[in-house]
Image (cartoon, rainbow, N blue to C red):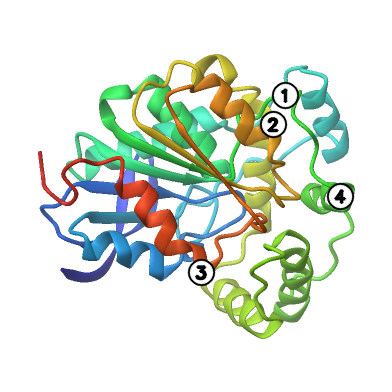
Amino acid sequence: MTAPEVSTVNANGLSFCVETRGNPEGEPVIFIMGLAAQMTLWPETLLDAYAHAGYRVIRFDNRDIGLSSHLRESLTGHPLAIMARHRLGLPVTGPYSLYDMAADVQSLMAALGINSAHVVGVSMGGMIAQLLAATRPRQVRSLMLIMTSTNSPRLPLPKPNLIVRLAGIGAKGHDEASVVARGTDFWRAIQSPAYPVSDVLVRERLTRDFRRSYHPAGILRQTRAILATGSLSSLTRRIEVPTTIVHGNADPLVRPAAAKQLKHLLPHARLELVDGMGHDLPEPLLPQFAQWGMAMDAHPGVLR
């Protein structure tokens, strides 16, 4: 098994920070991160589980976050008004959409010489993964959708105390201390009640990520991309690849109803509703996540 290697890969007219580890000849598995999160939020325990099983493990910073390309387009419209348009099923415009971000993944795969891969997506990354599997089925060997949704405006809203935070309203201070304090407060609100993480560990991670990259304008553009994409339901129902849906029954951000809708649209999928899990990736659950993901592959780690 090779040690993690970080490189810059040009794809879809942008540059992406990409990390690979594991067996270079193994079956590729691509991890797609969610809104506002750098690739560093993927837990090492989960990545190493796949690497030790013989997979070629790939994670990357999405556009507008981390060390990948930062775009410059400005946004118009009040964030809450834009959210309201989405809830009403009205069109929303933005500099790019999740379709563009799915094209990023497809282009990255081509740049890395990958014809098809297992795909693991979390939250917004799960929406991108759905688009990839629905529109490029031959490029997706299996799909693991973690705490994500179809982005349908009919789904339950996040808890009220999270909506204003998602819109970025009232955020004051962009120095390290302010950003870390704000992030810690948000993390307390979304983390798994059955698997709490100490504020000390949360602050350490947030501090590392702040020092690696801090790009709030990109987070707002990613949020707009989700709203501009609209519902994925009609595309999601086309997915035929082996799929596992993992969701916490205590998720305050993407409510459990989203997982149930995914299961309804994908009757062949395996649904795992996890007691006490919120909108995070609890360390004690990661070995089980890896088992669920690798169970979809009859020949783990072997290049076909």
For image coordinates 34% across by 27% down, the residue present is: 241
Q: Which residue is mark 1?
A: 92
Q: CA distance from mark 3 to mark 2?
A: 33 Å
Task: Give coordinates of residue 37: x percent, y percent.
Answer: 57, 57
For marks 4 and 1, give the CA distance. 19 Å
Towards the viewer: 41 or 193: 193
What residue does disc 4 label? 164
Q: Nearer the viewer, residue 175 or 35?
A: 35
- From the viewer's perspective, is residue 133 above or below residue 169? above
Left or right: 246 with respect to 223? left
Q: Earlier in the sequence, mark 2 or mark 4?
A: 4
Which circle marks residue 284 in the picture? 3
Are the residues at dot 4 and dot 1 in contact (C-beta closer than 8 Å)? no
Q: Hey, what amino acid is under mark 2?
A: Leu
Q: Nearer the viewer, residue 103 or 253?
A: 253
Asked if disc 2 and disc 1 are in contact, CB closer than 8 Å, the reply is: yes
Classify the position of the N terminus by image quarter.
Answer: bottom left
Q: Which residue is mark 2?
A: 227
